[in-house]
Image: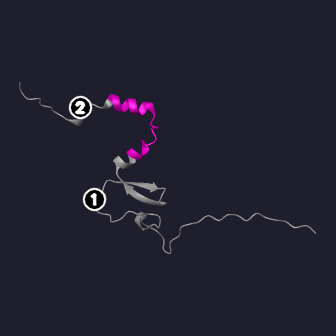
């Protein structure tokens, strides 16, 4: 008589909602807080430490992207070449001397 031993399959945890989700903010893995004019213009990003989607600013998103110093050199060169003072401070008036 022989026995067959089968490895138990690992089950993945699935998030489910008792009602169909029709809006992203109603999903169980979304943490958007109060959606008002302050949140306008923000990006949806996944937060690995909380396991939820949240809203972030473009500045925060860029800061996180450059934390490890892995930006391509071509990107850095393009920014350096296209960055001008006219774009930052238009019509600089040095006054008279």
State the mark number for residue 94: none
Q: Looking at the rendering, which quadrant does residue 95 occupy?
A: top left
Q: Nearer the viewer, residue 5 or 24?
A: 5
Residue span colored magenta: 62-81
Question: Which residue appears farthest toward the left when viewing the image?
Answer: 97
Residue contact between numbered discs 1 and 2, judged by CB atoms under 8 Å: no
Where does residue 89 sit, x and y in percent of width and height? Answer: 20, 35
Q: Residues within 10 Å of mark 2 (few under 14, many from 20)?
A: few
Where does residue 50 sit, x and y in percent of width and height? Answer: 47, 60
Question: Which residue appears farthest toward the top when viewing the image?
Answer: 97
Q: Is residue 72 magenta?
A: yes
Residue that label 1 marks:
38
Question: Which residue appears farthest toward the right when viewing the image?
Answer: 1
Residue that label 2 marks:
85
Quadrant (top left/top right/bottom left/bottom right) for the N terminus:
bottom right
Q: Nearer the viewer, residue 94 or 74?
A: 94
Residue depicted at 33% across the width and 28% down the height: 81
Vertical order, 91 against 65 (above or below): above
50 with respect to 57 (left or right): right
Residue depicted at 41% across the width and 59% down the height: 54
Where does residue 65 sit, x and y in percent of width and height? Answer: 43, 44
Where does residue 67 sit, x and y in percent of width and height? Answer: 43, 43
Vertical order, 84 against 43 (above or below): above
61 with respect to 38 (left or right): right
SS label for mark 1: helix
């Amino acid at each position: 008589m022989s026995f067959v031993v089968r490895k138990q399959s690992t089950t993945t945890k699935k998030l489910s909602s008792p009602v169909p989700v029709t809006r992203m903010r109603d999903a169980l893995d979304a943490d958007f807080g109060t959606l008002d004019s302050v949140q306008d213009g923000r990006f949806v990003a996944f937060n690995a430490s909380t396991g939820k989607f949240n809203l972030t600013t473009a500045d925060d998103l860029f800061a996180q992207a450059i934390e490890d110093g892995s930006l391509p050199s071509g990107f850095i060169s393009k920014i350096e070449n296209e960055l001008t003072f006219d774009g930052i401070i238009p019509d600089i008036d040095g006054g008279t001397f």
